[in-house]
Image (spheres, rainbow, N blue to C red):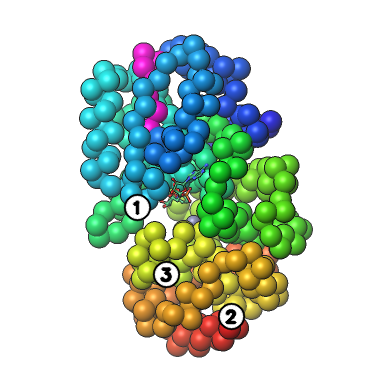
Amino acid sequence: MKALRVEAGKPYSVHIGPGAVDVFSAEYQELLNAADRIAVIADETVASLHLRRLLSSLKPHEASVFTVPAGEAAKSAEVFMSCHSFLLEQGCSRKSLLLAFGGGATGDVAGFVASTFMRGIPFIQVPTTILAHDSAVGGKTAINHPLGKNMIGTFYQPEAVIYDLDFLHTLPAHEIRSGMAEVAKHAFISNEQWLEEILAIRSFAEMDDEQLMGHLEKGIAVKAAIVEEDEFEGGVRKYLNFGHTLAHAIEAHLGYGKITHGEAVALGMGYALLLSGHPKFEDFLSWCQSNGYPLHHLEEIPFEQVLGFMKKDKKSSGGTLNFVLLQETGVPNFDMVEEERARIVYEEFRLKIR
Ligand code: NAD
Ligand code: ZN
């Protein structure tokens, strides 16, 4: 097992490896002892698969558990309020400790609950997806508003991230693809040699635990370095949105839940690479094909359908669209793209995936 440090406003460790939950008793006894109550907010699917293991790692401490709907459905105002009701009913106080147990969605809502319950209580992320190597680090919390995703939230850092890779074995294939796309994103914006290792993976099923752990560690290190430099997203943190302008538009057009976030990011990165003239565009496309990314969605979505959403993107203004572009691996930049050029390249992209 390894521990990485995140030196954000409040420094904390990310413990990663098989059996990582054992650090609760090895390193977090004091924090557990100091808590008058321990509460777990758990994704219902994850709870049914892995809760027993988590609770036994906390022993002799007892925790009360509140399960929330699996995945994105947890990020609603109703679920947020019901988490608060649960904590109040359990008699939690400012001295209570909250654990988030699930993927990025559970982490986002539980982090928001932790940051607002009695104006903030300590919390620990126990992520269970590959994608959560990204979401559990960096301190962004959120729920969705009917008018937009992640519209309500805070910046709030956890006490620790305890990333037990044993939990990842039950992930379905589309969630593995989703997470690996964000891993590839971290490689694209940081390191050519690592990117080549990732592009060499033709089937994620071939990856063993050790390889996966190496990729997750590198991804966390990239995310942590960016967050350390720009905790509140004034500058370089925006590079983490590589691939996301089109991804958000695809997700909004199809409806959340119709495609995983990371799979949409993979399509968005392909498009951004073609817009950028990046030499690895063809390699990336073939990687997406051999790993089963759902490229067919693009054939079904005309440019006009994504244009409106891309114009609404936080990064765009006026008649031009703003993208994170990448002419060279490791050197992301922002650029404006004329609508007409965006259209031509979109059509070119659709032809290439046929
Ligand atoms: P998720 O939390 O939506 O979970 C996806 C599905 O996987 C769910 O059905 C869940 O029940 C299931 N699942 C989770 N762990 C499992 C396991 N170990 N075995 C079997 N099934 C499991 O997915 P995600 O991709 O981890 O997170 C996506 C969310 O993260 C989005 O809401 C996104 O906005 C957010 N996000 C946040 C940040 C951030 O910085 N805070 C960054 C990226 C993404
Ligand atoms: Zn993302």
State the image coordinates of residue 260 (x, y, percent, origin top left): 46, 59
Label 2: which secondary element: loop
Q: Name which of mark 1 and mark 2 comes first in the sequence.
A: 1
Q: Which residue is mark 2?
A: 353
Q: Against 166, is 130 above or below?
A: below
Mark 3: amino acid: Ile
- Magenta-tinted stretch: 35-41
Mark 1: amino acid: Asn
Label 1 vs label 2, nearer the camera: 2
Quick check: can you spot residue 245?
no
Q: Against 337, is 148 above or below?
A: above
Q: For residue 154, which quarter of the picture?
A: top left
Mark 2: amino acid: Ile
Label 3 vs label 1, nearer the camera: 3
Viewer-side residue, 120 vs 270: 270
Q: Is mark 1 within 8 Å of ligand 1?
A: yes
**How busy is the neighbourhood of tag 1: few (under 14 within 10 Å), some, or many (20 plus)?**
some
Q: Which residue is mark 1?
A: 150
Q: Residue at x 56, y 43 (%)?
A: 170
Q: Which residue is mark 3?
A: 250
Q: Against 229, is 288 above or below?
A: below
Quick check: can you spot residue 127?
yes
Label 2 vs label 3, nearer the camera: 2
**How busy is the neighbourhood of tag 3: few (under 14 within 10 Å), some, or many (20 plus)?**
many
Label 3: which secondary element: helix
**How busy is the neighbourhood of tag 2: few (under 14 within 10 Å), some, or many (20 plus)?**
some
Q: Residue at x 24, y 45 (%)?
A: 77
State the image coordinates of residue 19 (x, y, percent, origin top left): 63, 29
Q: Against 256, is 46 above or below?
A: above
Label 1: which secondary element: strand
> Label 3 to label 1, Cα distance in Å?
16 Å
> Label 1 to label 2, Cα distance in Å?
31 Å
